Amino acid sequence: MKKIAEFFSFGGQQLVYSHKSEINNCEMNFAVFLPPNYKNAPVLWFLSGLTCTHQNVMEKGEYRKKAADLGLAIICPDTSPRGGHVPDEKDNWQFGSGAGFYLDATQDPYYKNYNMYSYITIELPKIIESNFDLDMSRQSIFGHSMGGHGALIMSLRNPRKYKSCSAFAPIVEPSSASWSSAAYEKYLGKNKENWLNYDSVALINKGFTFPEILIDQGEADSFLDEGLRPWLLSKVCEKTSINLELRMQPNYDHSYYFISTFMTDHLNWHRDRI
Amino acid sequence: MKKIAEFFSFGGQQLVYSHKSEINNCEMNFAVFLPPNYKNAPVLWFLSGLTCTHQNVMEKGEYRKKAADLGLAIICPDTSPRGGHVPDEKDNWQFGSGAGFYLDATQDPYYKNYNMYSYITIELPKIIESNFDLDMSRQSIFGHSMGGHGALIMSLRNPRKYKSCSAFAPIVEPSSASWSSAAYEKYLGKNKENWLNYDSVALINKGFTFPEILIDQGEADSFLDEGLRPWLLSKVCEKTSINLELRMQPNYDHSYYFISTFMTDHLNWHRDRI
C-alpha cells in the first residue's frame, strides 16, 4: 500500500492510497478520512456513482467537518478496476471504467478484473484492518446512485457486517433500469436470474432484509424515472419489516450539490447506529 | 447575462452566469450562491487563486451550508479574462489566463483585457445590482492566495465599499514575491512604483488602511516562504491602527482542504461585520 496524497483537514487527515488488488487484478486507489484522535473510530464506507473515482466525493461531498465532529472514519473506494490491461469501452460511461456496478463479473473477459462486490466487502476491509487502527466491528455503508445501489445490495446481503445503510438517489432495480441492464448482461451473461444477486428490489423479494434504510432523492433528478425509481423499493419494502425512510427532496438534482446538502443528515444517521 | 448552470443546494441556489465584460473586453463567468429567502441579503465576494476559475471554490470551498444559515450571498468571479482573442502564455500558470492578479494592466497588449481590479470593484457589482435583489450597501470580501491579495488591496483602497476583509494564505507583497513580480512587470511595466498600487504591504506603508483583517495561513503551505510571507503584513500593520488577526495553522497546506476547514470561521467573521 502506497500513500499517494495527504491533506490535513478539519483537524483530521484526508489520505489517498494506491494498492494492488488481487481480486480485481490491478492497482486500485481509495481515499480515507481519519478524524482527529481516530484510534478505534468506526468505519463508514461511501460508494460513488457512475464515472466517479474516489476523488469526486472527496472534493465535493463535504463530509469532513461532520465526520471530524462525530469521530467517523470515511472510506471512499474507486468505482471500478482500471488500467491498460483491464477490458473497457472507453466511449461508454455506463460500462467498464467508472461503471463496475459493485458486482462480481462472471463473463469472459470481465471476470478477471470486475469484482467490485468482493473487493468492497472482503478485500479492501482486510487491507483497512491491517493498516489502520480502526474498529472494523463497527462498519456502515452509504453511497450515491450506482454507489447507492452498491450500499443497498451489500447491506441486504451482509446485514451483520454493516450496522446501518443509507443512500442518495440509488439505483434500486438495476436489472431493469435503462442505464444498467446492458452492463449487467456483459458482466453477468444473458441469464437474468444471475443478475438478481445484485438487485435490491429482487433481493428483498427473495427475503433478504435489513432493519432500516434512509434514502434521499431529489425530485428534480433527471435520472429519476428511467434509472432510479425509488418507488419500486418503497413498494417491495411494504411487504417486509424493512423500515425505509424515503425522503423526496423538492428541487434537488442528481449532483454533489444535492449530496452535500444532506451529507450531515446521513452522517448523523450512521453515527446513531454504528 | 446568461444563466449557464443552476443547482439547488442547502435550500438556496448555486448559479453560474456568463456575461459580456466591457472592461475586460471578453465574456466572463461568475458563480453566485443565493441563500434561502435571499431578498436583500448582504454580498460576500470570494476571489480565487492562481489557475482557478469561479468553479474551484464552488465545488470545493464548502461555503453553502454556513452561507445558507447566515443568509449571505456569495459571489465567486473568475480570476482573469479569457478567450481566443485575449493575450496569454499558455504554459505559464503565473501569468495570463487564471493569473489576472486583480490589477488593471497598463501595458500593451494586456491593458485591453486584463482589468480585473475595475472588473471586481466596479463593473461586476453593477451587474449584480441590476440583476439580483441583494443589499449592495453591505458588501464584504475575502479570497485565497492571489485572491487573498485581491481582497486585501481592494479593501485597503476601498475601505467604505467593503464592510470586512479576510483571506486564506494571501500573497501580501506581490511586487516582490517570486511568483508575481514577473507578471507585474508584464502587466504594469518596468517602473516598480506603479506596481505598489496593487501591493498590500506597500499600500499600508503609504497610509492606506482598513479596520480589521482576519488571515488564516497553513504552516505546511509549500508557498509560505517564497510567495506568501504573511509576516511582512504583520510587521507593516504594527505601525498602524489595523487590527490584523493572523492565525498560523499547524499542518495545513495551501489547498481547498485547508480553505474549507476554516470557511465557517471566515463566514462568521464577515456576518458579524457586514
Image (tube, coloured by chain):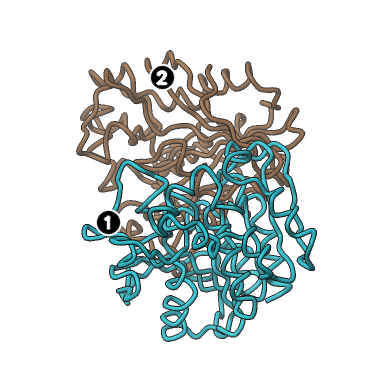
Chain colours: A brown, B cyan
Q: Position of residue A274 (x, y in %)?
A: 69, 39
Q: Is B140 or A121 nearer to us in this picture? A: B140
Q: Position of residue B270 (x, y in %)?
A: 68, 69
Alpha-carbon span between mark 2 and mark 1: 42 Å
- Find residue A175 and report its image quarter: top left
Instruction: Please name the amino acid that badge 2 sits on.
Output: Glu
Judging from the image, what secondary structure is the residue with disc 1 in?
Answer: loop
Q: Residue at x 68, y 45 (%)?
A: A10
> Closer to the observer: label 2 or label 1?
1
Q: Would you name the residue on which mark 1 appears?
A: B87
Mark 2 Cα shell of 10 Å, populated few (<14), some (14-19), many (≥20): some
Mark 1 Cα shell of 10 Å, populated few (<14), some (14-19), many (≥20): some
Q: From where the camera sits, is residue B52 visible? A: yes
Above or below: residue A180 compared with residue B79 = above
Q: Would you name the residue on which mark 2 appears?
A: A27
Above or below: residue A68 compared with residue B143 = above
- Judge left or right: residue B57 versus residue B205: left
Q: Position of residue A217 (x, y in %)?
A: 46, 58
Q: Residue at x 55, y 46 (%)?
A: B177
State which chain disc 1 sits on. Answer: B
Q: Residue at x 23, y 18 (%)?
A: A108
- Judge left or right: residue A94 versus residue B47: left
Judging from the image, what secondary structure is the residue with disc 2 in?
Answer: strand
Instruction: Please name the amino acid that badge 1 sits on.
Output: Pro
Q: From where the camera sits, is residue A66 visible? A: no
Q: Is B31 or A205 nearer to us in this picture? A: B31
Q: Position of residue B56 (x, y in %)?
A: 46, 53
Q: Is B184 or A3 nearer to us in this picture? A: B184
State which chain disc 2 sits on. Answer: A
- Find residue A110 and report its image quarter: top left
- Judge left or right: residue A146 versus residue A31: left
